[in-house]
Amino acid sequence: MSWRQNVFAVTAATFVGFTGFTLVMPFLPLYFQQLGVHDVGNIALWSGVSLGVTPAITAFMSPLWGRLADRFGRKIMIERSLVSFVVVMSAMAFVTKPWHVFALRAIQGLFAGYGALALTMAADSAPRERMALAIGTVQTAQRIGPALGPVIGGTVAQFVGLRRAFLVTAGFYVIALVIVFTMYRETGVHARTDTKERGRVTFRSVLAFENFILLIGVVFGLTFVDRSLGPVLPLFVAELGTEMRDVPLISGILFSISAGAGAIGNNICRFLLARMSTRRVIAAAAAMGSLGTLAYVFAGGIGLLLLGTPVLGLALGAASTAAYTSAGGVIPPHSRGTGFGLLSTGSLVGLALSPVICGLLGTLSLRAVFVLDTIILVSLAGLVRRLMVTTRVTPTAPPATEEV
């Protein structure tokens, strides 16, 4: 069975799932209005805690689900996660109180984490020399899906209403589940099959792998910077003198440029890794990303933002793929679920903390947010350059057959 079929199945399921999720989540404040919450402050509060509770819980649960995936197989774990999304999203269409939404989002956090599992499955399926390609492809789907979801969701909600839009989202997850069930063929080596030979998989043993704790810090830092733009970018665009009627359009363009450049960075990483070690790729990309954030620091108009945004997006995409590829190279296949789960925790903590810290910092100075981003990226470049043990992923000529 071709490894490419597995990567396609995981990528397609990831794209469908991430698109489905963003069909409805951006419109959650409007849904709370329909549930009888009319005070703007209360809407913001319910929306914030409901959106934040899922990644917060998932950050704690992801390593556990990854460890179970190492023991029982990745496929059944991602199917479990997708089934939970079908159930929770369907239930969202029938809630009557704001706390119902919060409770369902909390439950969702207990069973989520299929993003990390998808990366694990891609790394398991691909030959070592194609691992960067597989991981970058799945990460591209994770970026493009959320970029398209709100546009599709706005159209769906206009035709069927917000409540029924949750049922449409559940249908997306059904499609993702069918794709994984019918197309993905388990090929990984799991801890339950060779525990005696390899030893028991523990969190401590995974953390002891080469560069692993450093890579968790890298993933955290990259995610923190990536998500820092959300709370402040529209405000910064307005601060630069943009007419208020043009702020949403220009902000949307910048967000789209960032997502598109990040997807390109995910894909070009494999070419960089063919010529350089993962240490050099991550360090160079982080340093290049700091140039993008410096463009924000010194911007006097939109023109410099249009130059800095694609540079930052490319850098974050390339560095992220290189970090996960490096981790996939040092973690034995029977421990990858646990390892990628721990990496996902680093990413989710960055996802949860970045909007809060940057939002608070933005109350003092919007440019201070970009100064912090620059410091983080320069620090990551220096730490990786100094502390990371050199590893290299060198693509070889394709084998005579693609069967594995």
Image: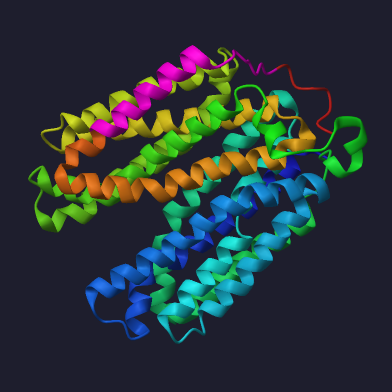
Indicate the quadrant where residue 40 lies. bottom left
Q: Residue furthest front?
A: 204
Question: What secondary structure characterizes most of the magenta part?
Answer: helix
Q: Position of residue 9 (x, y in %)?
A: 70, 49
Q: Which residues are magenta?
A: 371-395
Q: Residue at x 46, y 54 (%)?
A: 146
The question of residue 392 being in magenta is answered with yes
Q: Position of residue 285 (x, y in %)?
A: 43, 23
Q: Position of residue 270 (x, y in %)?
A: 58, 24
Instruction: In the rendered view, tell whether residue 381 sits above or below residue 233.
Output: above
Figure disc tally = 0
Q: Residue at x 37, y 20 (%)?
A: 287
Instruction: In the rendered view, tell whether residue 3 sits above or below residue 397.
Output: below
Indicate the quadrant where residue 76 lies. bottom right
For the N terminus, give its image quadrant: top right
> Does the rendering let one see residue 125?
no
For the C terminus, give its image quadrant: top right
The question of residue 187 being in magenta is answered with no
Instruction: In the rendered view, tell whether residue 207 sits above or below residue 119.
Output: above
Indicate the quadrant where residue 46 lies. bottom left
- In this view, the residue in front, 9 or 80, is 80
> Does the rendering let one see residue 18?
yes
Q: Position of residue 150 (x, y in %)?
A: 40, 61
Instruction: In the rendered view, tell whether residue 373 sits above or below residue 107.
Output: above
Q: Residue at x 24, y 71 (%)?
A: 41
Q: Is residue 163 left or right of residue 327?
A: left
What colouring does the structure picture have? rainbow
- In this view, the residue in front, 281 or 191, is 191
